[in-house]
Structure formats: C-alpha cells, structure tokens
Amino acid sequence: QSALTQPASVSGSPGQSITISCTGTSSDVGGYNYVSWYQQHPGKAPKLIIYDVTDRPSGVSNRFSGSKSGNTASLTISGLQAEDEADYYCSSYTTGGPSFGTGTKVAVL
Amino acid sequence: QVQLQQSGPGLVKPSQTLSLTCAISGDSVSNKTTAWSWIRQSPSRGLQWLGRTYYRDKWHNDYDVSVKSRISIKPDTSKNQFSLQLNSVTPEDSAVYYCARDLGDYYASGIYIVYYFDFWGQGSLVTVSS
C-alpha cells in the first residue's frame, strides 16, 4: 500500500491552532470514512486520537479534531500545549491493508 | 482496559526467523468483534502494517503483499496471545515491531475493513545483524 502524504513538520506557539493534512487518493482517504490519527511521543507506541475521520476516543482532549474533504483528511490541534509536541500519523483503510501517513513532527515554539 | 505485552529477541541474524509474541489482557484473542495485528516502524519505511489474525466463523489471516511469502501470524488461545514469525530476514527488516488491536468488520465476501488500531503494545526493537 502507498503511504499517505503528510507535511514533514508543523509548528506553532502555545495557545495557537495548527492543522496537519493527510493526502491520499480515491482508493483510500477519499473512498472511505475510515481515517484515523495517531500521536506518538519519542520512544512510545502510537496512541489513537481520532477515528472514523472525526470521532475521539474516550479520554482524548477535545482540542483534537478531525475532518475530511475529498482525498485529504486533516487533524486540527487547537489551544496548542507543550505536551502536544510529538509525531502524528494518519491512517486509512484501503484494499490490501491499511495505509499510514508519512508522519508530521509538531513543534511547540 | 486492554493491555498488550510484547516479548521476543531483539537481535536476529540475517536469513533466520524473527519471532515475537503479544500477550493480551482485558480482551480475548478469540473475540469475534476484533482482530490482532502486527505493525512495524522504521526510519526508511515509516509505519507499515504487516498482517492480522482474527476469529469469526473460523480463524482468518490477512498479510501485506510485501511480506506475504515470509510471514505467519498465529493465535494461541490457551495463553490468550498471538505471535509473529517473519522468515528469511535481512537488515531491511530491522525495525520497531508493534502488536495492536484492530477494530473493523469482516464481510462474507472475505474482505476485512479495518477502521482503526485502538490499543498498542509497547514496541520491540529488532535488529537484523550478524
């Protein structure tokens, strides 16, 4: 499966909002509402923060929100906090197996 | 709360077999509403799903085409765990390997649609080197 395209890095100041894009094709992101997002701190396993494009698991801050338009999904982090500094990955269903994004490093300035 | 505990050697010689185990607590490997996957992460490949095992009417396996000829994922119901075996490894198989619970739906046509991975193991760094 081909990797979904994400920006390598995004940065923002505390309190600001940032958005991470995840671009695929009509065979993955654009074709299904099964996009999920994962947060990964250094040396840790990925953690699910958004599933089914827009839903948040119990316990995940409502500062994280997801959306999709066409072949591009987006993750928005509002009220940026120091603890949000991490790598973020999107994922989507596609035939043959799930695809993951290339990953985005979020820096809190 | 579901917890996944991984175990296995961190160093494997080229051409040999990589073996890892994932012990499940808080859920059952035989749960008919979930699946159990292996995913690896390396600087060169990023996150790569390798395969899954799941029980519906019977045990099923799905594998990524890139490793299909070398991989085996098996459940062990007596120990409530599942395992990964990857044969004929090369240095390109060096990565951090994760087990994860896989939420999705299985259709009678034989297609499994994965929605997301909600619980992950702690990760196992495996290096392939002589």
Image (tube, coloured by chain):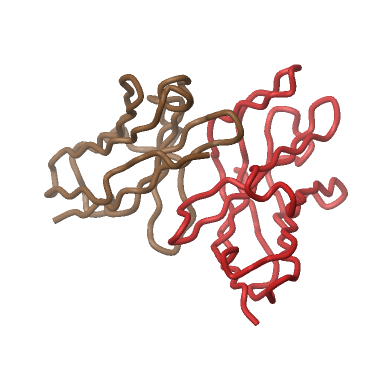
Q: Position of residue B98 (x, y in %)?
A: 58, 54
Q: Position of residue B41 (x, y in %)?
A: 51, 56
Q: Is residue B49 left or right of residue A48?
A: right
Q: Is residue B30 left or right of residue B40?
A: right
State which quarter of the image contains the C terminus of chain B: bottom right
From this viewpoint, which residue is outermost toward the bottom? B130
Q: Is residue A48 left or right of residue B85?
A: left
Q: Position of residue B107 (x, y in %)?
A: 71, 19
From this viewpoint, which residue is outermost toward the top? B108
Q: Is residue A62 left or right of residue B63?
A: left
The chain displayed brown equals A
The chain displayed red equals B
Residue at image location 34% in from the left, 52% down from the top = A87
In terms of depth relative to the viewer, which is nearer, A47 or A10?
A: A10
Q: Position of residue B37 (x, y in %)?
A: 65, 44
State which quarter of the image contains the N terminus of chain B: top right
Residue at image location 42% in from the left, 43% down from the top = A38
Q: Is residue A78 above or below residue B12?
A: above
Q: Is residue A30 above or below residue B25?
A: above
Residue at image location 18% in from the left, 54% down from the top = A108
